[in-house]
Amino acid sequence: MLSISKQTDYAVELILALSKLNESELLSLRAFSKQSTISFLFLQRIAKSLREARLIESVRGINGGYRLLKSASQISFREVIEAVQGPFSVLACTKKEQCQLEAMCTAKHGLRSVEAEIADLLGSRFVVSHH
């Protein structure tokens, strides 16, 4: 079942903070940790996941930090969810390749339709909207 983890919630907060920077600015995770009261170590794990998903990049050095690789208005909630929580799935039974009850399941078609609609919605909704 889909649930937004605390880690994903914090990832969205980090993306929003990064979206407020000018192109030449970088965000220090330590500074963001103090400002947001999110654990620095937890933020490091989140940043690593977002980096691996190519949503943000890190710049090393004394004045280093993080920045977005694309505009936050181009980053969907689904991208953030999948960067942090893994492949998107609303239904526990669709996470597996084959459910043991699939042959007798009478709800699978309706539930898969709902899952597809939610996936489309999360893919079309951006972390930062101009509306």
Image (cartoon, rainbow, N blue to C red):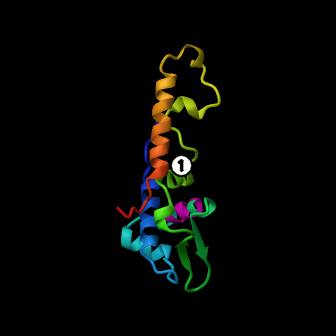
The answer to whether residue 39 is seen in the rendering is no
The answer to whether residue 87 is seen in the rendering is yes
Magenta region: 43-49
Which class describes the residues within 10 Å of circle 1: few (<14), some (14-19), or many (20+)?
some
Residue named by callout 1: 85
Tally of numbered discs = 1
Q: Whole-percent x and y of residue 76? A: 49, 56
- Depth check: 41 or 104 in front? 104
The residue positioned 50% from the left and 32% from the top of the image is 91
Q: Whole-percent x and y of residue 71? A: 50, 68
Q: Is 28 situated above or below 3? A: below
Helix, strand or loop for the magenta stretch, by majority: helix
- Depth check: 106 or 45 in front? 106
The residue positioned 54% from the left and 77% from the top of the image is 65
Task: Identify the element where label 1 is drawn.
Answer: helix
- Quick one: which residue is furthest to the top in this view? 104
Q: Whole-percent x and y of residue 97? A: 65, 30
Q: Whole-percent x and y of residue 30? A: 47, 75
Would you say 76 lies left or right of 62 here?
left
- Quick one: which residue is furthest to the bottom in this view? 62
- Depth check: 69 or 33 in front? 69
Q: Is residue 10 magenta?
A: no
The residue positioned 42% from the left and 66% from the top of the image is 16
Q: Is 61 situated above or below 118? A: below
Would you say 43 lies left or right of 100 here?
left
